[in-house]
Amino acid sequence: MCNKSQQCTGASMVSIKRAESAGDIAAIQAFRFRIWSEQEGVRLNDMESGLIADLHDGHAYHWGAYDGGVLVGSARLCIHNDLESAPDGEMFTGLPIPVPAASLNRLVIDRAHRGHGLAARLDAARLSVARTMGAKVVIITPMARAGRIQYLSNLGFLAVPRYGAPIWSSEVSITVMYLIL
């Protein structure tokens, strides 16, 4: 297991599992909050709850990345029959995007575990389910960071020069990307 004074041994030691229980999902919501507020230093819109959660958590598919049973990463996928109901869906207005659409969102990796392929493994799990569920497109609003945008572009995602902020923090800049399946 990685801790603050050690380097991670790699993503191969980390297991990726679907989170289905209410307890697992609550742990993921608290994990999101901890990473964004403590590791990234972002002021969140709801600092009192200790969670990053929304109405989509109830119908979404969730994954956790576990190193020795410790949650070190998480991600979420939602399927939508209209873009307006998707997280950050308003950012896709006017784009030629078919439905149903799968939205990839809430990717969070503990800082000590970054750079070892966990995001790629979580993305692969989510893309596989999106295809299985019959999505025609995958939409995503990643942080406007060059490395993540380049990685998604390499997977075939198209970048749209639109920027905004997620509902959970006005301090974070996100952008628009999509992949036609």
Image (cartoon, helix red, strand yellow):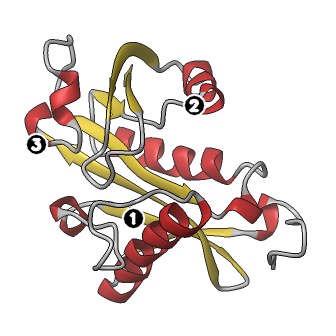
Q: Residue at x 85, y 66 (%)?
A: 8
Residue 179, visible in the rendered structure: yes
Q: Secondary structure at mark 2?
A: loop
Which is more foreground, mark 2 or mark 3?
Answer: 2
Residue 181, visible in the rendered structure: no
Q: What amino acid type is highlighted by mark number 3?
A: Ser
In this picture, residue 71 sits left or right of residue 21:
right
Q: Residue at x 78, y 52 (%)?
A: 116
Q: Which residue is mark 2?
A: 145
Which is more foreground, mark 3 or mark 1?
Answer: 3
Quarter the N terminus occupies:
bottom right
Query: Which percent across, then down, holds residue 15?
Result: 67, 70
- Label disc, if present, on residue 154 of the rendered structure: none
Q: Which residue is mark 3?
A: 85
Which is more foreground, mark 1 or mark 2?
Answer: 2
Q: Secondary structure at mark 1?
A: strand
Query: Which percent across, then down, holds residue 127?
Result: 45, 41
**In contact (CB < 8 Å): disc 1 and disc 2:** no
Mark before the other along the chain sequence, 3 or 1: 1
Mark before the other along the chain sequence, 2 or 3: 3
Instruction: Report how far apart the C-alphas of labels 2 and 3 lie in the structure.
Output: 25 Å
In terms of image quadrants, where is residue 181? top left
Q: Which residue is mark 1?
A: 62
In terms of image quadrants, where is residue 40? bottom right
Q: What amino acid type is highlighted by mark number 2?
A: Arg
**In contact (CB < 8 Å): disc 2 and disc 3:** no
Question: How busy is the neighbourhood of tag 2: few (under 14 within 10 Å), some, or many (20 plus)?
Answer: few
Question: How busy is the neighbourhood of tag 1: few (under 14 within 10 Å), some, or many (20 plus)?
Answer: many
Residue closest to the eye, 158 or 114: 114
Query: Which percent across, then down, holds residue 171?
Result: 39, 45
Residue closest to the eye, 152 or 146: 146
Residue closest to the eye, 153 or 51: 51
